[in-house]
Amino acid sequence: MNTHSVAVKIQRGGLMLFALSLPISHVPAQIGIGLAVVGWLVGAVVNKKITFVKHTFLGILLVYLLWNILSALLSPRPLHSLNAVGDNEWPFLIMVMMYWTIDDVKFLRLLLMLFLCTSGIAALYAVWQTFTGVEFYRSMALYWIGGYYRAVGFYGFYLTFAALVMMAFFLSATLFLEDTKKRLFSGAVALASFLAIIASFARSIWLSLAVGIPVLGFIKNRRVGLIATVALALVVLLGTIADENIRARALSIFDIEENQTRINLWKTSLNIAQSYPLLGVGEDNWDYFFPLHKAEGYYDTKVHPHNDYLNVLVASGIPGLLAFVGMWVVSLRVGFKAWKNAHEPELKAIALGASLSVLGFMVGSFFQNYYGTFINCLGWWFIVGLIFTADKIVVRAQSSS
């Protein structure tokens, strides 16, 4: 076995470890990224050539990172803020490793299957949790909501888990619609993931499904869109009628009093942004500036703005926010284009499912810090990697035909 083959095996082994372990633990997932980078670097040394693929998205990402670094350097706590930038933003490496090194549908499909297998296990575990209240992985007490327990999967926090399983839902649901050969598996994972999201009682991810499911249907065709929308409406109606706990949680989305803390956090964020519109205050300096710009009112938490867009606006100003939103808009455009142009059912499913996952994150991010949560950031960059890798394969297939 030559050195090049070893490098490829290390790199691909790292990506496989990441996809397999992410729904269960972020530690091996991070090791997987490290292995992928090591394999890529070894390959570059052996071949005396760096594998690199250009894209407009990478330019926007570079602007976003550089602006965050500049904001951190000019903040009152530059070392603290720079450390936060490095700690929070490095997961983008999983995306570039996938985009630069994966060239075949077979391996991309393998990553998808590994991720969905462990996601399905995590989803089933979560459904079991909500009825039993037993969490043996971390030996923690689960939050009691009426007659149920809030499911947390393997991650110990319901929001983190709900965002991860949302990715599994959209990827498996699109696989169900696009690939008739895998409908038993993909349908089972989609159903388990949907039930797990309900069991998490994560309102922001409920809203992500409320947007993403009709979009998925109508993208396919009008008939599927109407069926998906009506089915979702019936599930919501039956759920809220049948169970007072689900009803109370759903109605709380629209209750101003129930969301007073979040509204006050948003007001405080806008106060900070108004004072520092260009560079922001530097990443992870929210706590430093909060007392000086605090909006009056009730708070039951003060850890972050509970909104990814406001979090970025506070940290790196308007330019940082524009770059942040620009990345996801470009991702959606590329993903939907790849879905439209792909011929292989699995490629279509990957491109569409990952795009809907990005859309789901974008919706949920209006109400929570998902990009600002490290574990969810790993997942976010993984699905972006799926989008751009699928698009690269589609474009190369078109150019060679």
Image (spheres, grey):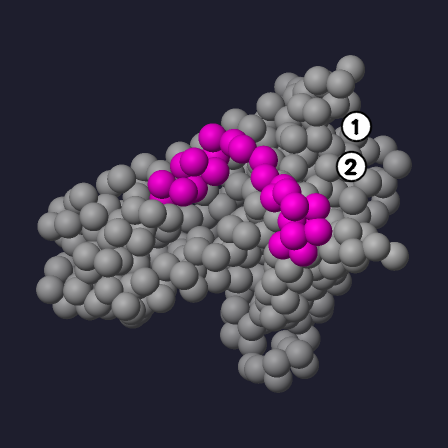
* In the image: residue 70, left or right of residue 168: left
- The reply to whether the C-beta atoms of the residues labelled 1 and 2 are less than 8 Å apart is yes
- Residue 106 at x, y = what percent? 82, 40
- Residue 65 at x, y = what percent? 37, 48
Q: Residue at x 24, y 41 (%)?
A: 318
**Front tag of 1 and 2:** 2
- What's the amino acid at mark 1? Glu
The residue segment tinted magenta is: 40-64
User: Is residue 264 something one can see in this rendering?
Assistant: no
- Residue 249 at x, y = what percent? 47, 57
Q: Which mark is residue 344?
A: 1
- What's the amino acid at mark 2? Val
Q: Residue at x 69, y 37 (%)?
A: 350
Which residue is under mark 2?
A: 105
- Residue 340 at x, y = what percent? 66, 21
The secondary structure that dominates the magenta segment is helix
Mark 1 burial class by Cα count in 10 Å: few <14, some 14-19, many 20+: few
